[in-house]
Image: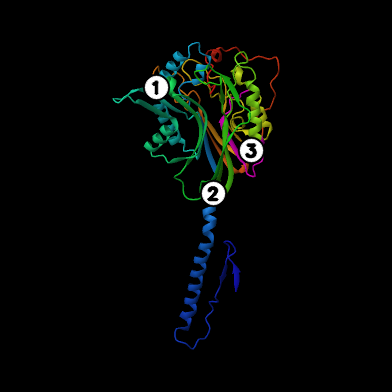
Amino acid sequence: MIHPSPQRGALIKIVDTKMVPDERKGGKRMIVRKLVTAITVAVFLTSLFCLPSAAAENRTYNVKVMTQNMNPGADIAAVAFAPDPQQAIAEIIGAVLASDIPGRAALVAAEIARTKPDLVALQEASRWEIITGLDDTGQPVMLVLDQLQQLLLALKAKDQHYRIAASNDLTEVDLAELAGISYVDRDAVLVRSDLPPGQLKVLGTENHEYEYLMDVPVPPILSPSGYITVLRGWIEVDVKANGARFKFAATHLESPLPDDIYPGTKAIQVAQADELIEKLQKSSFPVILTGDFNSDPTGLYPPDQTDSYYHIVAAGFGDAWKELYPEDPGYTWPVAPDAPLLERIDLAFSNGPETISIERTLLPPYAPPADFVYASDHAGVIAEFNLLAKHTTGLGYTQKPIVKGKTKPANTYWQKHSHRRF
């Protein structure tokens, strides 16, 4: 008789165990032996068929991502607004050296080691080249402080395995001949490289620059043309995680200036956001979008009270933080010893995958000691998504436009610290 197996419908042949006359020696034992052999083969075959099912049950369709603005240590754009550019350059060099780029990279690496994100979006992973003097032959001695490479070295020292999936070199300012300093602003995406085959695979990457960019007027020492174009862009990484495909996008939108300093920069940022979401909406796969968006319409920093955030949410991208913590402002900037947090601009969005968890990291303790080392002036954000479950866009919060004529509580920190221009 043939009966279906209770496991995956496998077929097992059942041999009738009724003893029948058999003229051959050992006939009864032969029948029993056939029965045992048939059952043994059936169990073996059934176990083979069940292996893919067991492997599938052990698969994880969750993906964890991190976004971190690394803070270059100083804002080279301050030269553009300084009465004495040479003095401003000297102060920038001093600030960069004092910021301890290797030490701050180690702090970021420690958080990556603790949380083990699959993908890490980095903004302002900058590269400085500073001439510190001359050698015995009269040649300049160059100090290179590369934040991306310092982070990779710190990760290696902690036995964490990450590689660069993509990097996007953006604004470059080369003053090596005039003032002994050069600077490259850079965004990057790291991907974890120690997972089993098939669990996380990068299928392709794309670097983009926005069409609408800000031209900052500068003195001739910075640019003979009289201005520098601040390049902004985004990175797309196509990923497959245990067979589930998605797109990971990372960006750094323009940081608007106060209108009395440079009018119109808010409109540039909103145009960048619109260009980004128009491109991402064409993706055939779910999108997880992270980065430094410099947009918080309900925050306390007036230049960043822009509509970019609302445009992204209206396009179907759920704000991971607001979905889980609708009543918590979750501010991420500025992380500094002399000011309170004012706004939430380091964000994680999804147009499909459900938010499982999200946390801010690299925030100081409630009362940090005087010698507390800040990894960045931005908190990091780490979010985990389920690629198969669906979220509800707008869950737990209401999308409202900025109400004209209403002002935010007064705060003078932004008036004293006009940075993040480049």
Q: Which residues are magenta?
A: 278-296
Q: Amino acid at mark 3?
A: Leu
Q: Which residue is mark 1?
A: 97
- Label 1, label 2: how many angstroms apart (C-alpha)? 43 Å
Q: Which quadrant would residue 218 be assigned to in this image? A: top right
Sequence-wise first label, 2 or 3? 2
Q: Which residue is mark 2?
A: 242
Q: Quadrant of the N terminus?
A: bottom right
Question: For numbered disc 2, what is the local secondary structure?
Answer: loop
- Based on the picture, tell me whether residue 137 belongs to the magenta stretch: no
Q: Which residue is mark 3?
A: 280
**Front residue of this view, candidates 36 and 284:** 284
- How far across and down, in percent of the image, does residue 340 sit? 52, 17
Res. 395 visible in picture:
no
- Label 3, label 1: how many angstroms apart (C-alpha)? 39 Å
| Rendered view: 246 above or below 127 | below
